[in-house]
Image: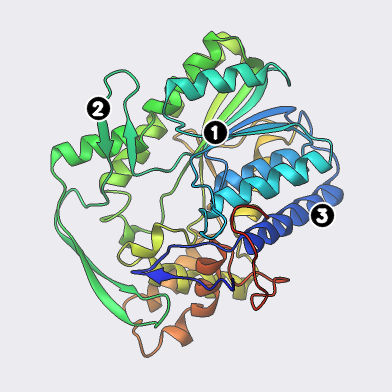
Amino acid sequence: MIIKPLIRSNMCINAHPIGCAKDVEHQIAYVEKKAKERGPLPNAPKNVLVLGCSTGYGLASRISAAFECGANTIGVSFEKEGTADKSGTPGWYNNMAFDRAAKAKGLGAVTFNGDAFSDEMRKQVIAASKQFGKFDLVIYSVASAVRVDPVTGEMYRSVLKPLEKTFSGATMDVVSGKFSIITAEVANEEEKRQTVKVMGGEDWARWIKQLSEAGVLADGVKTVAYSYIGPTYTHAIYRDGTIGAAKKDIERTARELDAELKKTLNGEAYISVNKGLVTRSSAVIPLIPLYISILFKIMKKNGTHEGCIEQMERLFAERLYTGSAIPTDDEHRIRIDELELNPKVQEEVAKYMPIVSEDNIAELGDIEGYRHDFLATNGFDIEGVDYTQEVTRMDTI
């Protein structure tokens, strides 16, 4: 069959197996090139656990750990397997491509497909860790709309809503370029509570506690989770909304974990604040597609644009493993969003946001770059792939 992207309401609902694999290969090639340029990283990790390993920052973290640091990795993600004639999720193919490449390099790689929120998955990871050794880095990059509490069995669902007042903002159809207005009503306290339960720090802390009790964390272990801040005019829907409440909770958790790990294992816990990118969720958030399109054009013009793999390679090589103390802001956060939030960049973005429209988005923003990144997350529009070629089966690559 010839596979073309199926897009519904700014969501791509299928994936191209060969495109996904090729994109993983491109990311690996980038990291290997940087590794040769930089040379060995001081105190690079040997055994790494990546929770949420299949796409985006989690996948890029695993690639950086394996192909720059030479680490054995265990990854956990919840993906849908492809069948002979129906596409799996992009992360399913990404994981297959990663495992194949890691094993070809002689690196240990174990990938679990299942619920990262469950205690059963924690037991499986702990058992698997014995074949490599204790973890000296744990990355927490789990993204989900739903979480089942492993203690109570309660199901929590996250929402993207403001907390103060109704928020309305324009968004852009990724296919047609047409603008429309999205309105988000104010969340109630229960919606806020459930969003924090899904996307806050509770599950991260439970992972670290159980890994520590099982004795599989190395002395000097580091653990890192990811967050986003962004510019002030997106704060009402993001940083100061339900998702922001969850991010603030995970940032608080990082400080608590850091204090505990310092006492018990001479370890450290951090939040890395990363750059805004095109993701499967950001495409449906009011204002964000317009902001990202404008931001990309400015940063590409300045030569400072980064995608997931560039950000994570830099996190490892210029923050976590330099041989020196890790630089943080006054809230103990690693900042690799400094290029995005550079005052001159944001001043230029702020000039265009109030005037951007359907008529001028192609001039003011990088609409083609936005579309490429949107499609690439599902394995489409990847360099080196012949999309006119038939794919014989969708359950393998």
Label 1 to label 2: alpha-carbon separation:
27 Å
List the residue tagged with mark 2: 154
First of labels 1, 3 by sequence position: 3
Q: Nearer the viewer, mark 2 or mark 3?
A: 2
Measured as percent of width and height from the top left, residue 326 is found at 63, 33
Is residue 156 or residue 227 the one in the foreground?
156
Residue sitting at x 46%, y 58%: 279
Residue sitting at x 32%, y 61%: 285
Q: Where 362 sits versus 113, above or below?
A: below
**Res 139 seen here:** yes
First of labels 1, 2 by sequence position: 2
Residue sitting at x 72%, y 29%: 45
Q: Where 91 sits versus 393, above or below?
A: above
Q: Characterize the local packing of mark 2: few (<14), some (14-19) or many (20 or more) Cα atoms within 10 angstroms.
A: few
List the residue tagged with mark 1: 224
- From the viewer's perspective, is 312 left or right of 209? right
Given the image, on which type of amino acid does mark 3 rest?
Answer: Lys
- From the viewer's perspective, is 374 left or right of 360? right
- From the viewer's perspective, is 280 left or right of 139? left
Give the secondary structure at mark 3: helix
Residue sitting at x 46%, y 39%: 142
Given the image, on which type of amino acid does mark 1 rest?
Answer: Val
Query: Dots 1 and 2: beta carbons under 8 Å?
Result: no
Is residue 8 or residue 317 the one in the foreground?
8
Given the image, on which type of amino acid does mark 2 rest?
Answer: Glu
List the residue tagged with mark 3: 33
In which image quadrant can residue 153 be found? top left
